[in-house]
Image (spheres, rainbow, N blue to C red):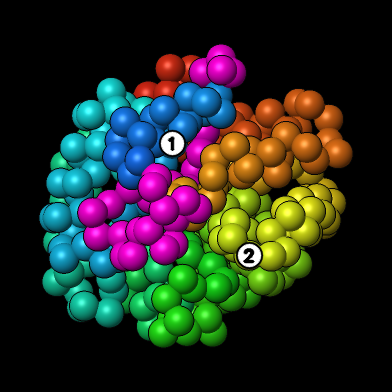
Amino acid sequence: MPAIGPRVDTHLHLSRWWRDLPRTAYRADLDYTVAGLLAEMDRSGIGHGLVLQLHEAPSVTDGIAEAEGQFATSEGRLHPVSTVDPTKGPEEVRRALELWDRERGLAGIKLYPGYLSFYPHDARLAPVYEYAHRRGLPVLFHQGDTLDGLGLVKYARPIEVDEVAGRYRDVSFVLCHFGNPWMGEGAELVYKNENVYADTSGLLGHPSLPYFGRMIDQARHAIYEAIVTVGRPDRILYGSDWPLEELRIAVDLIDQLDLPEADRAAILGGNAHRLFRLDDAGSRVSAPS
């Protein structure tokens, strides 16, 4: 078993509201519990992870309560990333801001354009971005394809993040899934905007697909080409999208890149420690006031 080190998976999901787990998870008998996730993290040398709460949770309160339990049960290894649905109106957003102030270990905010019908530059999100600035919290966007066939990917293209990245230069934004299938567009956004990052999660289909082996090669090549476009690796984050991807395979996408070892280590954890203000033990460090 690899030593448990500074690797950080920046894109995990663990929720009782995950839909149709036996069909969508990378294996039907997955141990979809805190203990099961931590055991898989240990086997891949991953010290900490960010658990992105789902927009399917009945309320922000329910999502936060679930995340708090995971944070405690994992002894601080699974950091909460909360969410809010701006289409439910300003009261929902205000309630989320109030609850986020009380959430232990909150590491970031995840928004779901594509699954929900809003653009990242929707005016209803201004209080969220202002709050993120005050708290020093990164904002993560779902980008590209949606697991739900009813999602509208027009809301989830990287180009739609450019406006808010320019308007809120002191907020860090993360393009989840590197904008796949618009990874070139995602790389351009990271190259252009010093406050934009991208993660490598969710680039693979289900392992049962007949061309899965070639998908792995294609995804690794696409990541490499995107990093070359950006020009440096310091705003690229490793993520898996577990339970959709096996952690071992997601880590290998980075470990086998034709990059210097220091660059691979930065992508696998160093960049995340800096962005999410995790100390050497993985604890969240408060933003300077």
Q: What is the magenta range?
A: 1-30
The structure residue drawn at horizontal position 28% and vertical position 23%, both measured from the top left corner, is 75
| Residue 17 visible, this orientation | yes
Q: 270 left or right of 111?
A: right
Image height check: is 249 above or below 121? above
x then y, percent, for residue 23: 42, 63
Image height check: is 191 above or below 152? above
Q: CA distance from mark 1 to mark 2?
A: 27 Å
Which quadrant holds the N terminus? Answer: top right
Q: For residue 222: magenta?
A: no
Q: Amino acid at mark 2?
A: Leu
- Principal SS element in the magenta part? loop
Q: 92 left or right of 80?
A: left
Disc 1 or 2, which lies upstream in sequence? 1
x then y, percent, for residue 206: 56, 61
Name the one closer to the observer, 20 or 125: 20
Q: Amino acid at mark 1?
A: Gly
Which quadrant holds the C terminus? Answer: top left
x then y, percent, for residue 124: 31, 76
Residue of label 1: 49
Tell me where residue 238 sits by quadrant. Answer: top right
Count of number-bearing discs: 2
The structure residue drawn at horizontal position 21% and vertical position 62%, both measured from the top left corner, is 57
The structure residue drawn at horizontal position 50% and vertical position 53%, both measured from the top left corner, is 26
Q: Residues within 10 Å of mark 1 (few under 14, many from 20)?
A: many
Q: 121 left or right of 283?
A: right
Name the one closer to the observer, 151 or 276: 151
Closest to the camera, between mark 1 and mark 2, is 2
Label 1 sits on a secondary structure element that is strand
The structure residue drawn at horizontal position 43% and vertical position 36%, both measured from the top left corner, is 49
Name the one closer to the observer, 228 or 132: 228
Disc number for residue 209: 2
